[in-house]
Image (cartoon, rainbow, N blue to C red):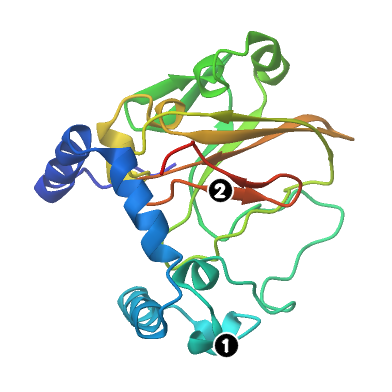
Amino acid sequence: MPDSNPPGIKDRINTWLLKLLPQHLMAAGMYRLMRAETPWLKDQLIRRLSRRYAIDINEAANPDPSAYPSFNAFFTRALRPDARPVASNAIVSPADGRVSQIGTIAGETLIQAKAHDFSLTALLAGDRENADAFRNGLWTTIYLSPRDYHRVHLPYAGRLTSMVFVPGELFSVSEATAQLVPGLFARNERVICYFDTDLGPMAVILVGAIFVGSMETVWHGEVRAGRG
């Protein structure tokens, strides 16, 4: 992977603040705001995000921003069936984001960012049995920015065998924060989904962030820590 841009002073200040501020309380407040259905409020939030991140609403299954009942509904919007063609009989990208790291697991060591490694066992919340199944396997990290389509699909056909919610911190998962917070992906809240496939075991791990403190799966529904 090419070298990442080094974090700037603003990135360092933001990361320092996140170490001090009540991350989960902030996430709980954002959870309520993002699900508010007051028309003028949710429309204003949608307009501001779309303008700031140059979101192409024409890719959405419903291109009318005002039709979404809340900002969260817009944030997790479905796309048109032809917006992202999927190759057949191939391993595909599970998410509409940027590949930040990709490679082969060196024993049980994964690369988080330049000069930052982290442990496969730590990522899997101390589950050594499952970690053994993925040693020296293939992996990739995909970063979803606010402009991206926020749904995750299977990269390869498989059968769900188990799902584990791991409580933790809620740092930003941006490229800069990945360079500043050791073990970031093994520290943040995450949902680990294990699958059996024709190619062997597969894990899809959904990692939370400062204002993304809940996730939802088609087999379980919403997954989040029990906070108000």
Relative side of 18 to 87, left or right? left
Q: Amino acid at mark 1?
A: Pro
User: Are the residues tagged 1 and 2 within 8 Å (C-beta)?
Assistant: no
Residue furthest toward the front?
Answer: 228
Asked which secondary structure carries label 2, the reply is: strand
Q: Is residue 87 above or below residue 205?
A: below
What residue do we see at 44% from left, 41% from top?
A: 1
What residue do we see at 65% from left, 75% from top?
A: 79
Q: Residues within 10 Å of mark 2 (few under 14, many from 20)?
A: some
Q: Earlier in the sequence, mark 1 or mark 2?
A: 1
Could you say where residue 185 lies in the image, as x and y percent from the top left? 44, 32
- Identify residue for label 1: 63
Q: Which mark is residue 215?
A: 2
Question: Which of 164/31 is in front?
Answer: 31
Q: Is residue 4 among what the camera can see?
A: no
Tell me the quarter of the picture where residue 60 sits. bottom right
What residue do we see at 54% from left, 70% from top?
A: 73
Could you say where residue 25 lies in the image, as x and y percent from the top left? 30, 43
Q: Residues within 10 Å of mark 1 (few under 14, many from 20)?
A: some
Could you say where residue 108 lies in the image, as x and y percent from the top left? 56, 15
Q: Amino acid at mark 2?
A: Met
Asked which secondary structure carries label 1, the reply is: loop
Q: Which mark is residue 92?
A: none
Relative side of 61 to 179, left or right? right
Could you say where residue 139 lies in the image, as x and y percent from the top left? 61, 34
Q: Quadrant of the C terminus?
A: top left
Inter-mark Cα distance, 1 to 2: 24 Å
Residue furthest toward the right?
Answer: 198
Foreground disc of the pair 1, 2? 2
